Image (cartoon, rainbow, N blue to C red):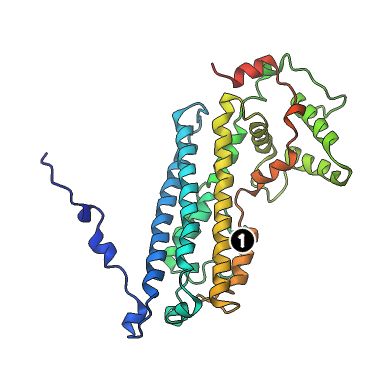
Amino acid sequence: MTHTDVHYGDYLQLDKILQAQFPESDKQQLPAHDEMLFIIIHQAYELWFKQLLYEVDSVTDIMKTPALDDNSPELQTVVHRLSRMVTILKLLVQQIDVMETMTPMDFLDFRDMLRPASGFQSWQFKILEARLGLKYERRYGQEYYISQLRQTQIDMIKKAEGEQSVLELLNEWLERMPFFAEKENWQHYRTTAVTGTKDEHIFWNDYRQIYINSLATAEESNRDYFDAVFSRTEAGRQLSPKACRAALFIMLYRGYPILQLPFQLLNSLLEIDEQLSTWRYRHMNMVHRMIGTRIGTGGSTGRDYLKGALDRHYIFAEIARLTSFLIERRKLPALSPEMERRLGFA
């Protein structure tokens, strides 16, 4: 095979990219200098959304493996790519600093020329949310959700919603944690609980009692909350009780070698949620600064819609809530020698 030299501009398709900015203000011969900045920033956002979706697809492909080995390179790859997503999302937040160099009057120079175009029509971002695990029924402002999109874009979003999300695959992965099903790991475990539920694992009987004893008087309601999260299956939950127990165990004993990567995976998902929330918060404040209480160009309620999405669109909230059930390290149940060997280096 003959090798053809690759040129920088050809490889990056710069002729297409650099000629893809067509300000409406130029078309209407009403010059608005900051419209070029507005276009380039949003084009950059969409390119990063494409990369985020590329990473999500690779993560879900790995996590769909029926027998994903927690000590395998594949799990390291999942953690690495989730960490990359966190870094990209931080960059998206920082881009708002550049956008805010545009004043409200600068924006008004071209804002009305954009109607009904709106960032609300970013189908890539909606697909990203769906692939991570944000379901339609949990969305704020469902009446606006697909109202401004073209049918091909709606079809892509619905297809994404029908696929297994990162959150669903996380639930399946956590449910596969073997430690509590392997009775030989608990042969020499020293239980401390005087009473307990007969059908519950000896470790969780102990942990529940220690947790309840740690509650202040004002936190008594957390006793029922503990049982609801770790023992009862209720409608509307994204993570099963079994998955929640596995996730909490990972958080509690993350210092053991075999649990370090699983903990990093959980922590990366929480960071993704945090960065998405930070991005929504900065976006909301920027919109309020730019247009006040006016309606968005796409017909949404502007800042009010963004505030509702900020409050509702946490994807991995059930993982974050598990921190309610942590106790001090010195009070943790001592694991059996068999379990310590299981969690240590082979």
- Vertical comparison of 321 with 138: above or below: above
The quarter of the image holding the N terminus is top left
Left or right of 46, for residue 345: right
Q: In this view of the protein, which residue sits in the foreground, 163 or 179?
A: 179
Q: Amino acid at mark 1?
A: Leu
Residue highlighted by disc 1 = 310
Specify the farthest residue to the bottom: 29
Residue 174, percent across and down?
60, 35
From the viewer's side, name the closer residue of 130 and 279: 279
- Using the rendered image of the protein, determine whether residue 144 is visible from the camera's viewpoint: yes
Q: Quadrant of residue 327?
A: top right
Name the image quarter holding residue 232. top right
**How would you rate the neighbour count of disc 1 (Cα within 10 Å): few for under 14, some for 14-19, many for 20 or more?**
some
Is residue 142 something one can see in this rendering? no
Query: Measuring 45% from the left and 41% from the top, which residue is drawn there?
Result: 81
Image point (52%, 28%), residue name: 70
Q: Position of residue 131 (x, y in %)?
A: 50, 51
User: Which residue corresponds to the image point at 47% horizontal and 27% vertical from the top-left?
Assistant: 72
Compared across the picture, whether 214 is left or right of 30 comes to: right
Q: Is residue 20 left or right of residue 244?
A: left
Residue 157 in the image, given as x and y percentages of width and height: 48, 59
**Outermost left residue:** 2
Q: Is residue 21 above or below residue 321?
A: below
Q: Residue 15: x and y, percent?
A: 23, 62
